[in-house]
Image (cartoon, grey):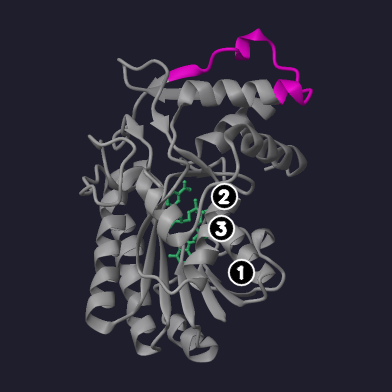
Amino acid sequence: MKILVTGGCGFIGSHVVDAYAEKGYEVTVVDNLSTGKKENLNQKARLYITDIGSEEMKEIFYKEKPDVVNHHAAQISVPLSVKDALYDAEINIKGTIRLLELSREYAIQRFIFSSTGGAIYGEATEIPTEETYYPRPASPYAISKFAAEKYILFYHDYYRIPCVILRYSNVYGPRQIPHGEAGVVAIFTEKLLQEEHAMLYHFPEEPLGMIRDYCFVTDVAQANLMAAEKKLTGIFNIGTGSGTCTYDLYKTILNILREKGKALNESFDEPLRGIARPGDIHTSTLNVRKARDVLGWKALKNLKAGISETIMWYMKNET
Ligand SMILES: NC(=O)c1ccc[n+]([C@@H]2O[C@H](COP(=O)([O-])OP(=O)(O)OC[C@H]3O[C@@H](n4cnc5c(N)ncnc54)[C@H](O)[C@@H]3O)[C@@H](O)[C@H]2O)c1
């Protein structure tokens, strides 16, 4: 199977590429390296450094003729999407449509899309939230992901392109970028490793912070493998089904760092505090029954083991 992965030099995309390459699939990556890094890329994959909106994409499809397109390239920051909604829409909506047009022209067999279960449902009244819950996106980023989903479903219905939409919860693990505005595990870990105080953003009435469903990146990569191999179409939540508040996450990271020998004095016992930013939501956890029953997927890594592996990676790879 020939698979084209957009964003394959990024955090999640690079793990997805690893999972495909390990199974012996021929993987081509398109990435403009805006947030991704060449060193993340699996050596077996072929890389084209370009934008998903570029003219070069036509040549890449012509040359590579992929069977499957796995679309991970995106503008991923919620605060940035609030600041510059047009830029977000340019990449996340128009970029996806351009890929769908090429996928139609080259009659690809499957289009896999990384959507967001963490943001798309907004402040859901059903927790954990099922796929059937009608999305109430609360930020331009979530709106652009929802719009992209709708275009993908249109191309499925109208042009018969099989598609799998994976709505991820909060993904964490090795290679996540701590400098960005997403990825609280990476941000806390890097701050504490550098012996700097980390900021916990929260709503005034909830001092323990927001509740999120943290899912380890290699589990997410396995979901992408199953999405490529199984002849399915549909939307699947990908997460653990359970929630952790930001304060407990901070404490878990702090304790594991100390267990691993990092000397952090008592001034680190409590994080700094900041008020929730525009686009933030209180609680997000995903009902993952459909992924288990239909896709045959389940998150395997528990939070402590995942955080421990992530910390080990950051300790080895200075960012
Ligand atoms: N990290 C999460 O918790 C999470 C949750 C839900 C959904 N997602 C989705 O998963 C995907 C990957 O996210 P990530 O956390 O790995 O982010 P990331 O920033 O590490 O990866 C994105 C990759 O896409 C590339 N890219 C961005 N814009 C591009 C463009 N216009 N053309 C070509 N390449 C481009 C970047 O260089 C990077 O390598 C995104 O679609 C994101 O919306 C992530």
Q: Which amino acid type corresponds to the residue marked 2 in the rendered image?
A: Val
**Quadrant location of residue 123?**
top left
Q: Which amino acid type corresponds to the residue marked 1 in the rendered image?
A: Tyr
Residue behind mark 3:
221
Query: Vertical placement of 302 versus 143: above or below?
Result: above
Indicate which disc, 3 or 1, sits on the residue closer to the N terminus. 1
Q: What element carries label 3?
A: helix
Q: Do residues under tags 3 and 2 come within 8 Å of each other at their CB atoms? A: yes
**Label 1 environment density (alpha carbons within 10 Å; few <14, some 14–19, many ≥20):** many
Residue behind mark 2:
217
Indicate which disc, 1 or 2, sits on the residue closer to the N terminus. 1
At 38% from the left edge and 75% from the top edge, which residue is drawn? 99
Q: Which stretch is magenta?
A: 257-273
- Mark carried by residue 20: 1
Magenta stretch holds residue 264: yes
Magenta stretch holds residue 74: no
* Residue furthest top as drawn: 266
**Quadrant location of residue 151?**
bottom left
At 27% from the left edge and 49% from the top edge, which residue is drawn? 140
- Mark carried by residue 102: none
Q: Which amino acid type corresponds to the residue marked 3 in the rendered image?
A: Ala
